[in-house]
Amino acid sequence: MLKSGITVRWLLTTILVIALILACISATIVLGLRDYYYDTVEGKLQSLGQSGVIADYFSSYLDSADDAFSSRAQEYVDNFQDINVAELWVINKQGDIIASSTGFISESEIYPDYEDALQSVSGRALWQGAMSSGEKVMALSVLLPKTNGNSNGAIRYIISLEAVDIQVWKIVLVVSIVCLFALMLVVISGLFFIRSIVTPVKRINAAARTIAAGNYSQKIEINKRYDDELAELAESINYMTAEIDKTDKIKNDFISTVSHELRTPLTAIKGWTETLLCINESQDETINSGLRVIQNETERLYSLVEDLLDFSRMQSGRITLRLQKIDIIAELDDAVYVLRDRATREGKEIFYSSPDYPAPVNADPDRIKQVFVNIIDNAIKYTPAGGRISIVAMIGSDSIKIKVADTGCGISAEDLPRIKEKFYKANLSAKGSGIGLAVCDEIVSLHKGTLDITSVLGEGTEVCITIPTLPVNLSERKDS
Ligand code: ADP
């Protein structure tokens, strides 16, 4: 489409410049030819009005009576050879036209060249203008020799410029058609050229977006027809993507291996801490509190390792669900139960409301609970003491909505669109890996549901999980 892309810029710059150049060349050709034609007309007038020939013809009649001069003038007009090229007038000493080669004399005619000739030293003057009929002409007045300083009239030759002008207009038309044709050729060939650039650029751009979204298997198709810079760019991007893909795989494998390696000793530490706490209970308070610190920190490390394992499973598409028909409300009850104590300990109030009847869904109970725990855990984590977390479940006709809203720090509009990205943390000072929401989003998507987050910085956040429900057997609801 014509946006402010390369095509429009090319049309505006190149085509405008070419059009301007063509217009200048055409104007030069047309004006040059017009001048040439006008010069030819002037040359013809000058060759007709040779002063010597005229003076010879009228020499014996200059001082004779008007009648004798008139008949000599008529004779001169009648013998005029170039009647098809020019018109001839004879003007007497009073300045009146007394003979014309067309036989038609107009009283209202103007002939400024005659006045100019009277003033000029050479006794000749040229004029270009319109006759009383509107016809454009070029005229030359040649004075008859003066006697005692007095004028004896003049001979005037007139050539119409209409035919010349028609010829000039014809040339203008031909030159314009040729220029338009040339411009069209430039536009068509240019558009083909621009398309051969814009189309691969668009393809590269689309591929770059896909790669930026994390799909490193994306390859840009290379057009073998043009082995040019764009094909080279596509090749470089393909090479770059392959390299990123390789290092990404190495990184994922490393995370997976390290997480597995860490989990085994952590499980042992966790188990032994619990055992020692049981054995040592109420004997030595210092050892007890030390063991509790180890227990809490191991718990934290363990959940971080679990997050990392989930991340590497997600990266390699290995998050699998053990789907079964479950009551999702029961899983939510469990998650709230697990976290309520912690919230109370931290001085945060939990308000929980759910329907009294079950909501059957086809889901993996562990994964679904993991999502609830993660979202509620976040709400507790990012809400200061004295704040409130509200968890509300609402069953619709074909889905269930679980809304977890808090009165915490909120997320800025800038961070909100990126919050579900892996490792993205809006709050860098808070503890956490930044993977939780990405994993939750993936799990919810695998259940064909959605996870939407709305938030206002400084006011709070609301996370809404929507999961499709199975058709309900009404007797189930009545029984419960
Ligand atoms: P983390 O382990 O860092 O909490 P998550 O993926 O769960 O990772 O969350 C990503 C980021 O989203 C967090 O670092 C935090 O900045 C922001 N966030 C998530 N939930 C909330 C919430 N309820 N209130 C404010 N910020 C939140």
Image: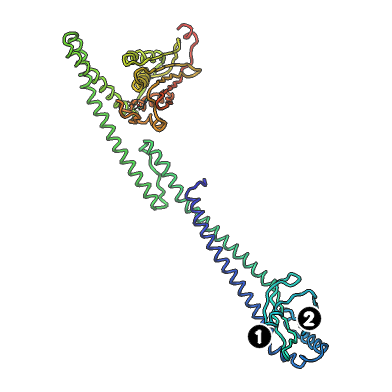
- Tell me where residue 433 sits by quadrant: top left
**Quadrant field for ligand 1:** top left
Q: In the rendered view, how is the structure colored? A: rainbow
Q: Are marks 1 and 2 in contact (CB under 8 Å)?
A: no
* Residue wearing tag 1: 122
Above or below, 140 against 355 in this view is: below
- Kind of residue indicated by mark 1: Ser
- Kind of residue indicated by mark 2: Asp
From this viewpoint, is residue 367 visible? no
On screen, residue 124 versus residue 272, left or right, reads right
Q: How many marks?
A: 2
Frontmost residue, 448 versus 349: 349
From this viewpoint, is residue 23 visible? yes
How far apart marks 1 and 2 lie (CA) works out to 21 Å
Above or below, 340 against 307 in this view is: above
* Residue wearing tag 2: 96
- In the picture as drawn, the residue positioned furthest to the top comes out as 479
On screen, residue 34 versus residue 190, left or right, reads right
